[in-house]
Image (spheres, rainbow, N blue to C red):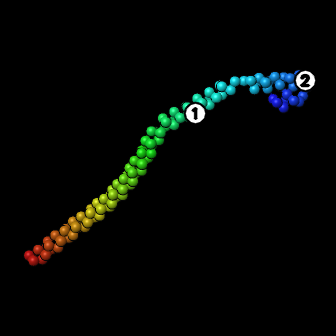
């Protein structure tokens, strides 16, 4: 507006000078008030957000611990399942050995008769 008030025709210069004078005479209070209100709102939001951030950090830490425990439990279950499978194989092998021994005893008894 200052540049416009210095260049151009008489009418446009006077118009620009008048607009510049109105702009400079304008009360800056609404702008200052808006800035202060914004800062206060930001401070309130930060105070309100703080406990939630702390709770979020605690929850994240608890989740990490729970995920680690779940991983350990999963590994323990896999190991238990493997041990169970091995035990069942050993049981079947022992039962087969007992059956074979019974068969040999029967054969021996038959031979002795």
Between 98 and 113, the residue placed more toward the observer is 98
Give how far across and how far down residue 16 sits, in percent: 83, 25
Q: From this viewpoint, is residue 106 visible?
A: yes
Residue at x 88% of width, y 30% of height: 7
Between 60 and 17, the residue placed more toward the observer is 17
Give how far across and how far down residue 26 sits, in percent: 72, 24
| Residue 96 falls left or right of residue 70 | left
Q: Is residue 84 above or below residue 25?
A: below
Q: Which residue is mark 2?
A: 10
Give how far across and how far down residue 14 sits, in percent: 86, 23
Q: Secondary structure at mark 1?
A: helix
Q: From this viewpoint, is residue 85 visible?
A: no
Measured in 3D between alpha carbons, the distance from the residue under mark 2 to the one under mark 1, in whole angstroms, is 44 Å
Q: Is residue 70 above or below residue 24?
A: below
Between 105 and 11, the residue placed more toward the observer is 11
In terms of sequence position, does the residue under pointer 2 or pointer 1 come before the other?
A: 2
Q: Residues within 10 Å of mark 1 (few under 14, many from 20)?
A: few
Q: Which residue is mark 1?
A: 39
Q: Is residue 20 above or below residue 92?
A: above
Residue at x 42% of width, y 44% of height: 59
Residue at x 9% of width, y 77% of height: 112
Q: Residues within 10 Å of mark 2 (few under 14, many from 20)?
A: few
| Residue 44 falls left or right of residue 106 | right
Residue at x 39% of width, y 53% of height: 68
| Quarter of the rendering containing residue 30 | top right
* Quarter of the figure that contains the C terminus: bottom left
Give how far across and how far down residue 65 sits, in percent: 39, 51
Q: Secondary structure at mark 2?
A: helix
| Residue 33 falls left or right of residue 23 | left
| Quarter of the rendering containing residue 109 | bottom left
């Amino acid at each position: 507006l200052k540049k416009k008030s210095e260049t151009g025709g008489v009418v446009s210069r006077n118009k620009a000078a008048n607009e510049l004078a109105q702009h400079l005479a304008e009360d800056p209070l609404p702008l200052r008030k808006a800035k202060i209100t914004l800062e206060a709102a930001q401070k309130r939001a930060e105070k309100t957000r703080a406990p939630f951030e702390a709770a979020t950090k605690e929850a994240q830490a608890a989740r990490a611990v729970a995920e680690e425990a779940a991983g350990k439990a999963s590994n323990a279950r896999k190991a238990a399942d493997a041990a169970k499978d091995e035990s069942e194989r050993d049981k079947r092998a022992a039962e087969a050995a007992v059956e074979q021994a019974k068969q040999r005893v029967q054969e021996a008894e038959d031979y002795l008769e």
